[in-house]
Amino acid sequence: MSSPAPLELGDALDALVDQFADPWSFLRELIQNAIDAGSLEIDVLLDHDPDQGMMTIEVVDNGEGMDREIIDARLTRLFSSAKDGDYTKIGRFGIGFVSVFAIEPELVCVDTARAGEHWRVLFKKDRSFERILLNHPGEGTTVRAFLKRDEAEYAAARERAREVVRYWCRHAHVEIRFDGERISEPLSLESRCVASYEEEGTAVIVGVWPEAAAPRGYYHGGLTLFEEVGDGAALPHLAFKIDSRFLEHTLTRDN
C-alpha cells in the first residue's frame, strides 16, 4: 500500500468541477473514458444501503484498464491525456475522471487491471488518494462513487442518473446498460421520410419534419455533443443528426 498523496489538482480542479452545469454529467465522462479504453460493453449500476444511508454509483467496463504508470501519469494529473490529436478517441482533454467530484462523494474507488497488474486507487473526500496493489486478477476498470443519501434521495438520484445516461449516450456505438437495461440504440429519426449518408468517420441522417422548427443533433462516437430545435427560419422542416469523429465538444462538454 502506498502512503496517501494529494491529488494533483488543487484550485484547478475546483474551478473545472464548478464549470459543469450538471454534476451528473460525470456519468457521461466515465462512459466516454470507457469507450476510449476500447470497452464494447459498459454497465452503470446504482445501489443503496438503507442501514448505512449510503448510495453507490458504479461504472464497469472491460476496456484496456490501467497499470501503475498510467495511474500516475494520467489518472491523477489534470489535463494529462494520451488522446490529444487522435480523432478516433472522444475525450481528448483528459479531464473526464475528475468530474466525479462534482457530486461530492464521500469516497471514490477505482479498481483497474492491465498487463498483469491489478490496482485499487482510493480517492478520499479531501481528494487525497492512495494506491493499493491487489493480488487477484481483474479486467478493465470499475469506478465506484459512494454518497450519503436516504431512500427518497436515492430514488430521485437513480431517476436522474438514467435520464443523463439516456440523453448523452443513447446513440453510443457500444452497448451501454443502466441497471441491466440496454440504453444505447442506433442513430435514428422519427420521421416518415429519412435519407442517410455514411463515409469513414461520419454518418448523417436527414428527415422531413412536420413543423418548421425541427430537431437537430450533433454526436461524436454516438455520444451527444449538442441537440437543439431549429427556429424554423433556417432550413425549415429539416431534421438531422450528424455523428462524426471530426466534431468536438467544449472543455466542459455542455455545448
Image (tube, rainbow, N blue to C red):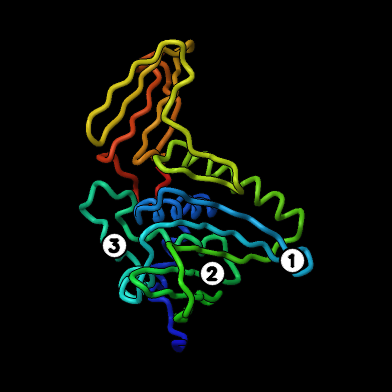
Kindly indicate the quadrant of the structure image that contains residue 224: top left
Q: Are marks 2 and 1 in contact (CB under 8 Å)?
A: no
Q: CA distance from mark 1 to mark 3?
A: 36 Å
For mark 3, give the secondary structure: loop
Left or right: residue 154 versus residue 110 is: right
Q: Nearer the viewer, residue 133 or 30?
A: 133
In the rendered structure, which disc, 2 or 3, sits on the residue that comes first in sequence?
Answer: 3
Kindly indicate the quadrant of the structure image that contains residue 48: bottom right
Residue depicted at x 41% and y 55%: 34
The furthest residue to the left = 85
Q: Are marks 1 and 3 in contact (CB under 8 Å)?
A: no
Q: Could you classify mark 2 by the number of other residues whose Cα lies within 10 Å: few (under 14), some (14-19), or many (20 or more)?
A: many
In the rendered structure, which disc, 1 or 3, sits on the residue that comes first in sequence?
Answer: 1
User: On the image, numbered disc 1 is attached to which residue?
Assistant: 53
Q: Nearer the viewer, residue 138 or 121?
A: 138
Q: Is residue 215 above or below residue 12?
A: above
Q: Amino acid at mark 2?
A: Val
Q: CA distance from mark 2 to mark 1?
A: 16 Å
Residue 194: assigned label: none
Where residue 119 sits: x, y (%)? 44, 75
Q: Amino acid at mark 1?
A: Gly
Q: How many marks?
A: 3
Q: Could you classify mark 3 by the number of other residues whose Cα lies within 10 Å: few (under 14), some (14-19), or many (20 or more)?
A: some
State which quarter of the image contains the C terminus.
top left
Residue 81: assigned label: 3
User: On the image, numbered disc 2 is attached to which residue?
Assistant: 108
For mark 1, give the secondary structure: loop
Q: Amino acid at mark 3?
A: Ser
Q: CA distance from mark 2 to mark 3?
A: 21 Å
Q: Is residue 174 above or below residue 157?
A: above
